Image (cartoon, helix red, strand yellow):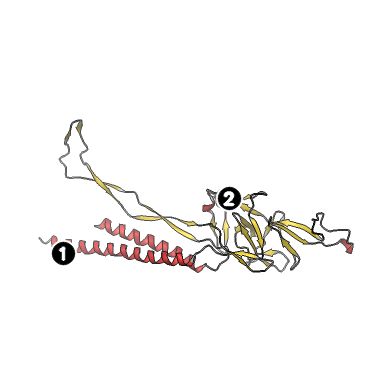
Amino acid sequence: MVRGWYTGASGMTAQQWRLDAISNNLANVDVDGYKKDIAVHKAFPELLMRRLNDDGVYRHPFGSADAAPVIGRIGTGVELNELYTSLEQGAMKETENDFDIALDGKGFMSVATPYGERYTRNGSFQLGKEGYLETKEGFPVLGENGPIKVKANNFMVDKDGKVWVNAEYADGDPTRLVSKENNAWGQTVLLDTLKIVDFDPERTRYLQKQGSSLYKATETSGAARAMEAGSRPKVVQGFVEASNVNVVTEMVQMIEVNRAYEANQKVVQSEDAMLGKLINEVVRL
C-alpha cells in the first residue's frame, strides 16, 4: 500500500510539470518566435514480484527452479524525463515594418550579447541609438562581418538574407561609391549578409532557453554552424514569426492534466483509506 502512495504521488508530480509547461506556453502565446515546451515523462523501472513463501525447491522435468518464482511485474511510478522544445514553424505575421525579419524554414539568426553569441527566431528588431540593428533588449544582430549598421528607410533585406543599402558617394562624387560592390538595382550596395546558423538536427533539442527568445548552444547540442547558400531558410522582411503555440490545443491538454491529477489524487486517498482500515480494524481481529 505504501508503494501505491509513491506511485500516485509521482503521477501527481508529473502532471504538475505538464501544467507548468502548458501555463508557460499560454503566457508566451503572443511572443514573436516563441517555441512551445512539452513535458516528456518516463516510467520508473518495473519491479519483478517473486513468491517468497515457497518451500525453496520444486521439481520440473529438467530439474529444480528458483526458490522464489516470478509472479509478475509491478510499476513504480513516473518521472519527468525532459522539457522538450518543439521547433516547428510558427505562422508569418505581416507588420510592414522594415526592421522586422522572419525566417521561413530551419535556422536561427545570431545575436551578440555580453555573455557571448546567442541565437533567436524572434525577428522583431529595432534601430539602436548608434545605428545598429538590434533586438528589443538592445543586443546587436550579427551579419557575417559583424554587427549590422543601417539607417531608417535606407536598407532592404532580400530572401537570401543579404542586406542592401542606398549607395553613398565619396566626397559627393556619384562615380565613386563608398562600397566596392554594386548590384543590378542601380544605386544600392551590398552591406552584409545576415548570419544564419543551424545545429545538428539530432541535437537541436538540447539548445538551452535563456529568456527573451534567445537560445544558447550547449555541449550536447554542439556548436552552431553557418548555413551555406542553398540550405539557408527564406528571409522575409516586413514579417515576424508568431509563436507556435495553439491556444485551443493547450487548453484541451490543461483539462487532461487536471483530470489525470485528480485520478492520481484519488489513488493516494484510496490507498490511505485502505491502510487506515487495515490498522484500525483488521489488526484488532
Q: Are marks 2 and 1 in contact (CB under 8 Å)?
A: no
Q: Can residue 214 be seen here?
A: yes
Label 2 vs label 1: CA separation?
61 Å
145 relative position to 24: left or right: right
Q: Nearer the viewer, residue 267 or 189?
A: 189
Residue 178 % position (x, y): 83, 58
Rendered residue at 28%/59% (across/down)? 5
Q: Which type of secondary structure does the marked residue at label 2 adopt? A: loop
- Residue at 87 percent across and 61 percent down: it is 170
Seen from this angle, which residue lies furthest top? 62
Question: In the image, what residue type sits under mark 2?
Answer: Phe
Q: Residue 112: horizontal and vertical position, in percent?
A: 65, 59
Label 2 crowd (10 A; few <14 / some 14-19 / many >=20): many
Q: Secondary structure at mark 1?
A: helix
Specify whether 38 is left or right of 188: left
Residue highlighted by disc 2 = 199
Spot the residue most to the left.
285
Place residue 196 in its image quadrant. bottom right
In the rendered structure, the answer to whether residue 253 lies left or right of residue 106 reads left
